[in-house]
Image (spheres, rainbow, N blue to C red):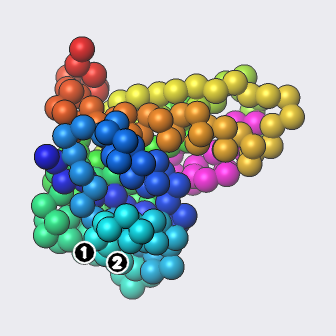
Amino acid sequence: MKNIVVLVSGGGTNLQALIDAEKSGIIKGGKITCVISSKPDAYALERAKNNNIATRVIPRKEYSDSKSYSMAILDVLREEKADLIVLAGFMTILDECLTKEYAYKIINVHPALIPSFCGEGYYGLKVHEKALEYGVKVSGATIHFVNEKADAGAIILQGVVDIEKDDTPEILQRRIMENVEWKLLPKAVSLFCQDKIEIIDGKAYVKK
């Protein structure tokens, strides 16, 4: 059974999707053992406590730079014996001291179809604003491994929704969360925990 540690910064809707998926048996071979928040008041911490999951708070503002912050998280991940780290609305770019130690063991969800509308500065509603500004006909979400560059790691799964004529960034965000993020993130976590993802030439493939 793999230890899953989830990193959060806000409301924790993706964390809730993972908790629900674990309870319903969708996630096989893994268990959420700890939730780490970058903010002490993140509602995600309540979600964890309500489900008897251990929590740790490592406030980002107490560290002068990304490297010192990533080192602090790294210490906790070692303590928690993390096999998989999931970034669920975690609003801090991690330093390579952490991403290299846990290469192909950190999963993130990005609310667009990478390589579109991604990279530094593309997060939250900004992603959906840009997609609608551009006039794309479909958008979606990407589940990918994390490396030292923002949104540049190997893609595991992608899912698509249609753009509707009257969409606002908020409406599009909700449609992508409900139809793609909350379904594909638990699926990717389960695939990882069952050793069903293989890396070939830096690309991720799901084993049949």
- Of circles 2 and 1, the one toward us is 2
Residue 102: in sight, yes or no?
no
Whether residue 11 is situated above or below residue 129 in the rendered picture:
below
Quadrant for the C terminus in the image? top left
Where residue 62 appears, as percent x and y from the top left, is 39, 85
Residue for point 30% across, 61% down:
95
Secondary structure category for the residue under label 2: loop
Numbered label tally: 2
Residue 172 figure quarter? top right
The answer to whether 19 appears left or right of 98 in the picture is right
Q: What residue did someone put label 1 on?
A: 72
Where residue 192 appears, as percent x and y from the top left, is 24, 36
Work out which residue is located at the far right of the displayed protein and give it: 166
Residue for point 74% across, 28% down:
163
Label 2 neighbour load within 10 Å: few <14, some 14-19, many 20+: some
Where residue 10 appears, as percent x and y from the top left, is 52, 66
Secondary structure category for the residue under label 1: helix
Q: CA distance from mark 2 to mark 1?
A: 8 Å
Q: Is residue 40 magenta?
A: no
Residue for point 31% across, 39% down:
25
Where residue 88 appears, as percent x and y from the top left, is 43, 54
Residue 133 figure quarter? top right
Q: What residue did someone put label 2 on?
A: 58
Q: Earlier in the sequence, mark 2 or mark 1?
A: 2
Q: Tell me the magenta residue range.
A: 117-132
Residue 101: in sight, yes or no?
yes
The answer to whether 111 appears left or right of 80 in the picture is right
Whether residue 170 is situated above or below residue 179 in the rendered picture:
below
Tag 2–tag 1 contact (CB < 8 Å): yes
